[in-house]
Amino acid sequence: METPDVGIPRPLAERLSMAEQYAYLRDRAMPRRTLVTAGAVAAGLLTGCSAAAGTRPAAPATSRAPGPAVRPFGRHLAYGGDPRTQLRISWQVPFAVRRPYVRLGPRPDDLGRRVAAELRPLHTPGVPGVRPALEQYYVHAAVDGLAPGTTYYYGVGHDGWEPTAPAHRSAIASFRTAPTRPERFVFTAFGDQGVGRAAQANDDLVLRQEPAFHLHAGDICYADVNGRGSTSDGYDPGFWDLFLKQNEPVARTVPWMVTTGNHDMEAWYSPDGYGGQLARFSLPETGFDPHGTPGAYTFRYGNAGFVALDANDVSYEIPANLGHSGGRQTAWLDRTLGRLRAEDGVDFVVVFFHHCAYSTSQHASDGGVRREWLPLFAKHRVDLVINGHNHVYERTDAIRDGAVGRAVPVGGSTDPARDGVVYVTAGGGGRDLYAFPAGVRDSYEGHVTRHEAVKTFAWTKDGDRAAETAEWSRVRYTGFSLLKVEVRAGASPRLAVSALAQDGRRIDHFEVRHGG
């Protein structure tokens, strides 16, 4: 039997993936789509939302589908400003729906609390001969007033789709809020994920680590394949449907804390290209400009403070958004790091962003990142910096004043106050892998080679490549991988940092501790 108007015949629905169901419904309800010229888009006449002005996308004119025919998909979680009491639940629907909401409670059979959700439409204009216009719909619920250290169960719904109905109960998922004073917790991290088998395998590896949350260092989906932040970039917004479906098995239970890479500057939506991110993600509004630069924010979990940054603002390599904050992000970073260092109970400060401060692979190092932010990392004794951008795993020694402050071999330890900061490139999240310079060998746990200097470069403000010799490149691995960090509190707090290959093998480990 077929649902009236735009439903999917049950036998067909059972054979189609969620993204294919999305396309089927969309094409039946909207067989004719408006196409626009690329010139009009470039002139700023057609935008889904204006991040600079802090507005949400305007609702496009389109018919609604019957509620029972519109199945939610792509659930993904994020913390609010306080992970102990605030969570943001997000998902996607193929059509505008009426009165979306979340139900949650202490057990799968007790979802008594109902929280209204916000529908954020996103319109992507078409380009004749290239792609049709596309409407996408994202839903977000801000859930506050939660109890620390508590497991909750939840289901998402809207008029006509009740998550507690027998047919939908298998879609109920869970999350856990941050404890007030955890003695131990784990988080994972990588960047440069995309859509595909390797990306999905890394999701599976994340789940096996049972992390409290995951840090994503940018270049999330690769709907924008060129990553130059221009309307001339090749762009297919439908990749986001595939990405959110791919990530749902992990992101529906593990908060997915993303920041902004160069491939996430989607110029179709706003002057800075962040309208898509504002529509798809609800991130902590603790940054200097949450509705204009969503990838810059901070949160605290236990004895660690975390700071996400938008490196497009300072990148010399890809200057589309260079200086877009007018220096406000760097000033906010200085204040935020100072506050975290002065906050009672904060032992560690972790910073993550996309472009590399130190790497020898394809994109090498960004001189803009170094100039603007490294003095602040040293000033406030940042404990660990995580980057993506280069599709490899690479880890430095502790770097102080631009040079090796202390060698940190596999299994070593370091004290940032004494030795400097360790920088980790965790760009093996799933996208096609890069290589290191010709003749430079991988060197990782179980495959350690003699330490050698690497000839590499750093990007300058003029867009040139300044040659340099890297004595600081300590560990290198050219396979898919992720970072796993165990944070310990108590009398001897430490960060136990490990890198795992996609098959689960450990390829690096070291410790960050104070006074060690």
Image (cartoon, helix red, strand yellow):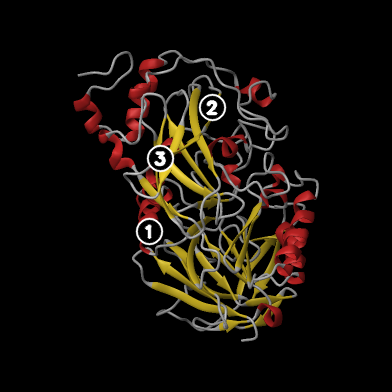
Give the residue type at disc 2: Pro
Residue 207's disc number: 1
36 or 271: nearer the eye? 271
52 or 363: nearer the eye? 52
Give the residue type at disc 3: Gly
Looking at the image, tell me whether mark 2 or mark 3 is earlier in sequence order. Answer: 3
Q: Is residue 491 above or below residue 436?
A: below
Q: Is residue 277 above or below residue 470?
A: above
Looking at the image, tell me whether mark 1 or mark 2 is earlier in sequence order. Answer: 2
x and y percent of residue 315 in the render?
Answer: 70, 52
452 or 284: nearer the eye? 284
Mark 2–mark 3 distance (CA, rounded to whole Å): 28 Å
Q: Residue at x 25, y 34 (%)?
A: 167
Q: Quadrant of residue 157?
A: top left
x and y percent of residue 171 in the render?
Answer: 32, 41
**Residue identified by numbered label 2:** 121
Give the quadrant of the C terminus: bottom right
**Residue identified by numbered label 3:** 112
Q: Secondary structure at mark 2?
A: strand
Rate crowding at label 3 as few (under 14), some (14 to 19) or many (20 or more) other CA atoms within 10 Å.
Answer: few
Q: Secondary structure at mark 1?
A: helix
Give the residue type at disc 1: Leu
Mark 1–mark 3 distance (CA, rounded to whole Å): 28 Å
Q: Residue at x 37, y 63 (%)?
A: 502
